[in-house]
Image (tube, rainbow, N blue to C red):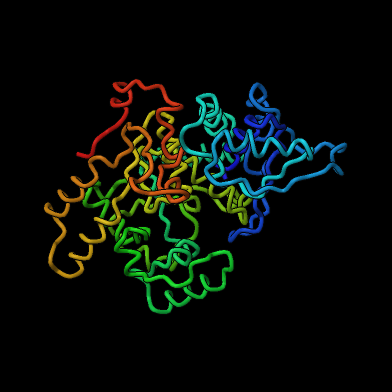
């Protein structure tokens, strides 16, 4: 959502358009009725961008019956595409409606002013609505009362598991339920998935049990406060028991706030996700169990704020180690810990340039293989003072 909004700000600048406040998707899996102003500070967004792009809340009445072009912008497109193909539509139309906003702008090779505008939009203009900011700050303060904390983005929710086809540590009944959800969700194109192969390639989120092994291997003590940034965990307590046994200070929105305090956000998945986003960005350490949209957005925001420590699990390596434990060929202890620590020594969000495409890839696959702009906005939007960044980053001990 954040990436799509900010890319449309940049596109509006490129084609010299007035941007109408975007409509949020209300037909997704979460069925959230929230409008832009329910999630973001609309007035602040408009005022912050006034020197870059003209933004209005609604389509002016005089344009209500104007000619309109509904356009699916080409994915990962550069300035030439928008200036030559899209801007040409102004000859016939007064309104251009972007049917989709995800990944419509290239990650690289854009003018510096456009890249900087993307960052201004994302990290300065796109502030959450006041009630969300206030609740988010309160949750952060309450987590800090327990000491420095980890924000764990635990993607072990029903939709994620159904979409990815991951069933490790689940019962046969649970696996069948998830398969049925995937088959009945029409906009999910891939239906037949081999869960064993999926996991072996590192395409599955870590399970709560695997997270416990991972955190113990990194050397985090059992009294480490952990904030669970997630929706409802699939299977509830039955799948969280092992992690809870290792780390009793597991907190979430529902434990930190009262029913009355959370009531305004209930049944609004985007607003609840925004609360998790705030607590995650402000955490001492952020650990995502899967590299999805939320995890990538938080990682990029933390990089922008000075490369705050983010530990990204090497899932492909970890599952091999965890399988050895299950098979009895390896035990928990110093050897496992050393392997995990050494593997993740360079996976902590330290300063580096954004990764380009994988060698040998072509066409759409080439763009898809690039590291997304909002995951790592270096060097486009960050001051390259390596020494100060390195002082900010920490290494696993």
Kindly indicate the quadrant of the structure image that contains residue 208.
bottom left
Q: Which of 216 and 382 is in front in this view?
A: 382
- Determine the residue positioned at 46% across, 38% down: 373
Q: Which residue occupies 56% across, 50% down?
A: 272
Expressed as whole percent of the image width and height from the top left, the position of residue 225 reads 35, 46
Q: Which of 173 and 283 is in front in this view?
A: 173
Q: State whether residue 129 is above or below residue 180.
A: above
Residue nearer the viewer, 109 or 55: 109
Q: Determine whether, in the image, residue 233 is placed left or right of residue 38.
A: left
Q: Which residue is drawn at 32% across and 43% down?
A: 311
Residue 128 in percent (x, y) is at: 59, 37
Q: In this view, does 238 lie to the left or right of 5?
A: left
Name the quadrant containing residue 1.
top right
The location of residue 25, given as percent across then percent down, is 65, 52
Q: Answer yes or no: is residue 74 visible.
A: yes
Whether residue 130 can be seen here: no
Looking at the rendering, in which quadrant would you find the C terminus?
Answer: top left
Q: Along the horizontal axis of the image, is 223 left or right of 240? A: left
**Residue at 49% across, 43% down:** 277
| Residue 371 spot, x, y in % from top left | 40, 42
**Circle count:** 0
Task: State the residue in front, 378 or 38.
Answer: 378
């Amino acid at each position: 959502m954040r990436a799509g909004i900010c890319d449309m700000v940049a596109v509006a600048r490129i084609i010299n358009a007035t941007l109408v406040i975007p409509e949020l998707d209300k037909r997704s899996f979460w069925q959230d009725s929230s409008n832009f102003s329910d999630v973001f500070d609309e007035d602040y967004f408009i005022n912050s961008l006034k020197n870059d792009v003209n933004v209005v809340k609604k389509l002016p009445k005089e344009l209500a019956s104007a000619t309109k072009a509904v356009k699916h912008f080409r994915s990962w497109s550069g300035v030439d595409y928008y200036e030559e193909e899209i801007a040409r539509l102004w000859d016939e139309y007064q309104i251009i409606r972007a049917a989709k906003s995800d990944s419509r702008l290239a990650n690289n090779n854009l003018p510096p002013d456009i890249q900087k505008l993307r960052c201004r939009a994302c990290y300065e203009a796109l502030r959450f609505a006041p009630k969300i900011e206030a609740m988010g700050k309160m949750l952060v303060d309450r987590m800090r009362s327990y000491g420095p904390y980890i924000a764990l983005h635990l993607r072990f929710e029903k939709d994620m598991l159904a979409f990815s086809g991951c069933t490790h540590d689940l019962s046969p009944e649970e696996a069948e339920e998830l398969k049925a959800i995937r088959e009945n969700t029409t906009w999910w194109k891939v239906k037949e998935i081999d869960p064993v192969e999926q996991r072996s390639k590192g395409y599955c989120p870590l399970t709560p049990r695997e997270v416990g092994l991972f955190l113990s291997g990194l050397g985090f003590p059992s009294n480490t406060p952990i904030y669970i940034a997630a929706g409802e965990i699939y299977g509830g307590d039955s799948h969280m028991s092992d992690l809870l046994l290792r780390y009793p200070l597991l907190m979430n929105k529902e434990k930190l706030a009262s029913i009355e305090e959370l009531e305004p956000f209930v049944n609004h998945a985007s607003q609840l996700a925004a609360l998790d986003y705030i607590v995650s960005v402000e955490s001492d350490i952020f650990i995502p169990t899967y590299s999805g949209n939320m995890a990538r957005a938080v990682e990029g925001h933390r990089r922008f704020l000075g490369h705050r420590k983010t530990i990204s699990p090497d899932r492909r390596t970890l599952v091999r180690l965890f399988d050895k434990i299950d098979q009895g060929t390896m035990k928990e202890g110093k050897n496992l810990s050393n392997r995990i620590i050494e593997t993740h020594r360079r996976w902590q969000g330290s300063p580096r340039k954004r990764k380009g495409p994988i060698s040998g890839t072509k066409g759409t696959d080439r763009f898809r293989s690039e590291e997304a702009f909002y995951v790592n906005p270096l060097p486009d939007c960050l001051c390259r003072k390596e020494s100060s960044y390195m002082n900010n980053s920490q290494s696993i001990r």
